[in-house]
Image (cartoon, helix red, strand yellow):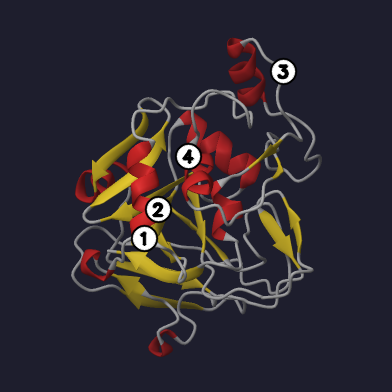
Amino acid sequence: MVNLFDIRQSFAADDSEVMRGNTMSNSTAKAPCLGEDTSAGRWQTVQLADLNDGDLLFVADPSGMGQAVQKSTGQFSHVVIYFKGYVYHAASRRGVVKDRIKDFLAEFAGITEAAEIFGADGKTGTAGITGVTGATRFFECSGIPDQVDSNQVGGVDHFQAEHRLCAVYRYPQIDAVSVRRQAENLLGQPYNRTFLPDGQGLYCSQFIATILPIFDMIPMRFDDGSGKDSASVSAYWQDYFADLGISVPVGQPGTNPNQIAASPQLVFVGWLL
């Protein structure tokens, strides 16, 4: 099973929250387990027509690099920004590009008809999703309040699934016209393969943080996600940076999709169908 996303529906406004890589501790906000009071709209889905210009879309990527990013930093491995039927993003093989939203979703995302839910009490329930075809998939919710681990953003519940999903977050104060103009100006920039702050080009979350400069940089980590040592380096990243001929930039300032999703300035909109 491929680890997917943390759902964060609301965020604590306390500036004293401590950020550790992709995680934030002392968070009082908590998205519910699926199957928990779904009638209240706490398990939200959105359609393409519901997207606003400037919405951020987060996905999990099954590629080798995507899996390595997820192990080091959390459940999301890629982030894009939406404008008028297109998404703008820094793709590892193509650099900064603009893709039709439907093409992007066909490549990166998917959702399923229903899910069997394992709540904090061990009981199960189902959350039906209408208008979607495909086999039933299974999600597992950690259901452990106030506990932060390497698979969580903000201490909220996490899910595991065989199928990729796309989560939508929104910055309510965005100047969409200005941000889109900046995104257009960066089209054609190469992908920053070094992840260094002064490296050539832009990596995915660096691109987002450049056109929407509301996110702090944090020390980068390239561990295996075990939680034993955030300063360690996984075998994947050792080989990756050896091929580039540079040292692994552990601790260098940077960003990652999970850290961006955990920002208290963003609100969770829903899962994109």
In this view of the protein, can residue 163 be seen by the observer? Answer: no
Q: Secondary structure at mark 4?
A: helix
User: Earlier along the polypeptide chain: callout 4 or callout 1?
Assistant: 1
Q: Specify few, some or many for label 4: CA neighbours under 10 Å numbering under 14, 14-19, or 20 or more.
A: many
Which residue is under mark 3?
247
- Image point 73% across, 34% down: which residue? 252
Q: Which mark is residue 176?
A: 1
User: Earlier along the polypeptide chain: callout 3 or callout 1?
Assistant: 1
Between marks 4 and 1, how big is the CA–CA gap? Answer: 19 Å
Whether tag 3 and tag 1 are in contact, CB under 8 A, the answer is no
Which residue is under mark 4?
204
Q: Amino acid at mark 3?
A: Ser
The image shows residue 193 at horizontal and vertical percentages of: 53, 24
Between marks 3 and 1, how big is the CA–CA gap? Answer: 38 Å
- Image quarter where the C terminus lies is bottom left
Q: Secondary structure at mark 1?
A: helix
Q: Which mark is residue 179?
A: 2
